[in-house]
Image (cartoon, rainbow, N blue to C red):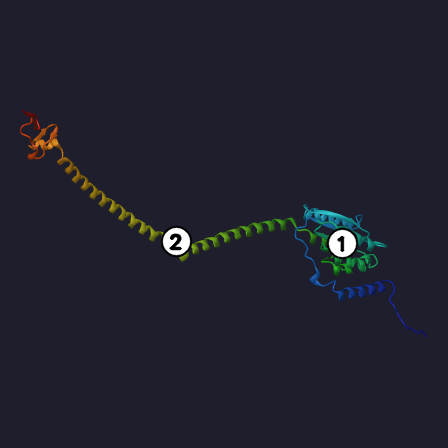
């Protein structure tokens, strides 16, 4: 007879149970929530890579980056990915990359293996370090069928390390397409702005407020024109009046011209070097001079 009072899984079963417990704990804390997922940049300049540099996964990631996006710079943070101290090594590599100010995204990955081989990526310290990373993290651990705590807490999960690098890098054709779309969009935006500006300018030109100054100018121009006409009319009148007065003055002056008076038959009487204008002033006993137009006659 066997009396069984308690049972617990051994080996793989025990690890799986530990996995489920930690998964539930972190899920309850919200570490897997979508609201905390950071956006993966479309065109990263630098990608941090946390993996073992001697593994095939590392070489595969380099090949993908060179093929898809040769402009990108890979910042390698070597790490143990299996065995004792692997979890601490992964944490230190993530911290080191976060101290840099120019890394755009981090890939944490390794090739496939058993649950024991991948266990470092199920450690709580690794999960919390990924969650606290200020840089977006892509998890690419194992094969497509493998799931680790890292996959749930990361900002993006890839089925393999190679797929992680593909998700982190744009394809060259995608870049060309993006540039073409950007140029087309920019060109259309410029055309739209010009068209809108033309419409706005047309509305302003045709608005009452814009035409009001023009109307005022036209009205004032007519007033100025009338004033100029009146001014020149007055000048013409003044000129004619002045000209007439000058003519009368000239005639008046000419009437006092002795030569012309003498030509008309007048005679000047001169006595004692003075002109005699009245008969009572003439002294018959004194010599006198009679001045005619053409000559003088002396009277003794």
Question: Does 281 sit left or right of 1 as displayed?
Answer: left
The answer to whether the residues at label 2 and label 1 have Cβ atoms under 8 Å apart is no
Decide if residue 295 is on the left or right side of residue 50.
Answer: left
Image x and y of residue 287, in percent: 7, 26
Other-residue count near label 2 (Cα within 10 Å), few / some / many at <14 / 14–19 / ≥20 = few
Observer-nearest of 89 and 220: 220
Q: Secondary structure at mark 1?
A: strand
In the image: residue 45, left or right of residue 241: right
Total labels: the figure holds 2
Task: Residue at 85%, 64% (x, y): give it.
Answer: 14
Location of residue 132 in the rendering, given as x and y in whole percent from the top left corner: 75, 58
Quadrant location of the C terminus in the rendered image: top left
Return the residue at label 1.
108
Choose mark 2 or mark 1, whichever is in front.
2
73 lies above or below 254: below
- Kindly tell me whether residue 262 is visible in this rendering: yes
Q: Which mark is residue 250?
A: none
Q: 254 or 145, which is in the foreground?
A: 254
| 3D distance between C-alphas at marks 2 and 1 | 71 Å
The residue that label 2 is drawn on is: 213
Residue at 38% x, 55% y: name it.
212
């Amino acid at each position: 007879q066997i009396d069984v009072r308690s049972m617990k899984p051994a080996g793989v079963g025990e690890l799986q149970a530990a996995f489920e417990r930690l998964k539930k704990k972190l899920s309850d804390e919200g570490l897997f929530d979508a609201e905390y997922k950071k956006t993966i940049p479309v065109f990263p300049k630098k990608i941090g890579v946390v993996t073992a540099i001697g593994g095939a996964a590392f070489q595969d990631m380099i090949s993908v980056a060179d093929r898809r996006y040769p402009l990108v710079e890979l910042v390698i943070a070597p790490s143990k990915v299996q065995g004792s101290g692997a979890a601490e090594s992964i944490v230190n590599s993530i911290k080191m990359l976060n101290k840099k100010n120019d890394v755009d995204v981090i890939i944490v990955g390794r090739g496939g293996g058993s649950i024991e081989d991948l266990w470092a990526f199920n450690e709580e310290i690794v999960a919390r370090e990924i969650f606290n990373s200020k840089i977006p993290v892509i998890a690419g651990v194992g094969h497509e069928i493998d799931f680790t705590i890292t996959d749930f807490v990361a900002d993006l999960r890839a089925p393999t390390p190679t797929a992680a690098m593909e998700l982190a890098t744009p394809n060259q054709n995608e870049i060309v397409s993006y540039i073409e779309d950007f140029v087309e969009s920019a060109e259309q935006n410029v055309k739209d702005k010009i068209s809108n500006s033309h419409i706005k300018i047309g509305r302003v030109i045709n608005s009452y407020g814009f035409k009001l100054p023009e109307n005022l100018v036209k009205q004032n121009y007519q007033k100025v024109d009338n004033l100029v006409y009146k001014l020149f009319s007055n000048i013409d009148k003044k000129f004619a009046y002045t000209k007439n007065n000058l003519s009368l003055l000239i005639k008046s002056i000419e009437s006092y011209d002795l030569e012309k008076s003498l030509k008309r038959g007048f005679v000047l009487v001169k006595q004692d070097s003075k002109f005699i204008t009245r008969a009572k002033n003439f002294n018959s006993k004194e010599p006198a001079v009679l001045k005619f137009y053409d000559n003088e006659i002396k009277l003794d």
